[in-house]
Image (cartoon, helix red, strand yellow):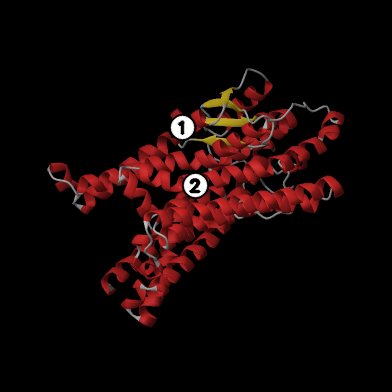
Amino acid sequence: MTHLLIIAAYVSLHLRDVPSMRPVAIELGFWQSVGVTLGGFALLAVWTDLLVRLRLRRIDRRGRGIDVFRAMRSSARSRTLATVWLAVSVVVFGWLESVRSVVGDPVLLDELLAMLPLFVVWACSWWSVEPVERRLREATLLRRLDEGLPVGPGPSRWVFVLDAMRHQVLLILVPLMFAASWIETLEKFSRGDGRIALWLQDDLIRLGATLAGLLVVFAFAPMLLRLIWDTRPLGDGAIRARLRNLGERHGVGLGKLLIWRTHGTVLNAAVTGLFPGVRAVLLSDALVDQLDERQIEAVAAHEVGHIRRRHIPWLAGAAIVLLTGVSVVVSMLVFAVWGPIAMDDWRGAAAIALGLLAGMAVFGVVSRRFEWQADAFAAQHMSGLSTARGASDPEIHIREDAADAMVGALERVAVGNGIAPERRSWRHGSIRRRQRNLEKIVGLPAVALPIDRQVRIVKIAIVLCGVITVLLLAAHGSMA
C-alpha cells in the first residue's frame, strides 16, 4: 500500500494542470498557501500521535489485541490521509506553485521539496507506533526463548523509523525519481533550441528516448536497492547450497545471495532484477533465524517462481493495460453521454478517478493469481519438479510435505510480521487463503495445476485487453 501512496503522491503534484481540476482551485498568497498546507500536515501528525498514545495506554492496561490493531491502523491511516492532503494542497491551495516561487522549476528539486512534508508526517507516524511494535516483540520473547530462536535487543526508535523509510519509502521513491527526472529532462530539452530540441519534438523519437531511459532505470533499480537497504553476502553453508541448487534446477541465474539486515523486525525475501547480471536474492535476517532450511528453500522457490513464470513483466503490462483501458472506457462513456465539454469539468475528473479505481481493483485480482502461482511453484519445486528444460514429468505429484513447507513458512511469516492470517491483502490475498490453496493441490500432478491454467487465461485476457485498449485509444482520438 505504501508504494501505491508514493506513486499517487507524485501523480497528485501534476493534478492542478488537469483542466477539470481548475474550478476547485483557490488562489492564495504564498504565506497563506504555506500556512494552510504545513498546518494541515502538522495537525495530522499530532492527531495521529495522540490516537496512538491513547491506544498504547489501553494496551498497557488491558493487553487486548484489538487495541494493537487499532493503533497500527491509526498509523497507517495517517499516511493515507497525508497523501490525500498533499493532493488537496496542490490542487486547491497551489502548494507546488508556492514551492516553485522559491526554488524555481529545476529538474526534480521542486517535486521533492513539495513531497517533503508528506514524508515527515509518515516518519512521525512510524515514530508514534514504534512503542506498539516494541511491545509486540516483548510479548513474543518467552515463546522465542522456548523455541530456541535467537533473541536480540531490537532496533532503537530512531533506527525503527529509519528502517521504515528505507524499506518502504526509498524502495519505490528512488527509482521513481530517476524515471521522473529523465522524463522532465527530455521535456525541458524539447522546449529549447538546437538540434536536440528538434529531434525531441518528433513524437516517435521522444517516445523512444523516454522508453530507453525508463528501461535503463528499471534494469539498474535492483542495484540501487542493494545500496538503499542494509545487505551483506550470504556465507557458505547449507542454505547457500540449497539456493544454488534451486537456481540450477529451474534454469534461473540467481546472481548475488544476500542477507537483508532488518534488526530482526522483518520476515521476508525478495528476488530483484530482471537480468541475471544485476539479479540478487535477499533473505531477511529474521527469516533466516526463524525458519528452518526447507521453509527457507520454499520461500526462495516462491521468489524464483515469479521469475520463471515471468510475473514482473506481465504485471507491468497488466498495470498499463488496465489503468489505461478502464480510464478510456469511462471517459468515452462521459464523452458519449454529456459531450466533450464534460471532460473539462468534475465529470471528467470523476471518470478518470473511477477508471483508476476500477483498474486497480482488477489489477489486484491479477496480482493475487500470480502470487498463488508462485506459492504453487514452491510446492512443485519441493516435490521434485525441475523446469530448467520444461516441466514435462507427469509422474511427479505434489507431496504433502512439500506443500507443508510453504504452508509452515507462510505461518511463520504471519506470526513474525504481526499479520493476522485472515487479513486480506490487495496484491497477495490473505495468508490463510494462500495456505488453503496449497493444501488443495496436494496429490495433484505437478505439471497440471489449476492455478497454472488460471494464469494462462489471465495472460490471454491481458493481451486481449491490450489490443482492445489500443483500438479504443484510436477511436477516442478520432472522436476528440
Give the answer, above or below, for where 419 lies relative to 329.
above
Q: Which residue is mark 2?
A: 117
Identify residue type, mark 2. Pro
> Helix, strand, or loop for circle 2?
helix
Q: Residues within 10 Å of mark 2 (few under 14, many from 20)?
A: some
Rounded to the nearest angstrom, the CA distance separating label 2 from label 1 is 24 Å
Identify residue type, mark 1. Leu
At 17% from the left and 46% from the top, the residue drawn is 192
449 or 376: nearer the viewer: 376
Tell which residue pokes out farthest to the left in this image.
194
Q: What is the x, y in percent for residue 104?
A: 30, 46
Give the answer, above or below, for where 146 lies relative to 47.
above
Q: What is the x, y in percent for residue 476?
A: 32, 70
At 59% from the left and 54% from the top, the residue drawn is 44
138 or 127: nearer the viewer: 127
Which of labels 2 and 1 is toward the front? 2
Residue 399 lies in quadrant: top right
206 or 256: nearer the viewer: 206
At 72% from the left and 32% from the top, the residue drawn is 294
Q: Earlier in the sequence, mark 2 or mark 1?
A: 2
Q: Which residue is mark 1?
A: 224
Q: Residues within 10 Å of mark 1 (few under 14, many from 20)?
A: some
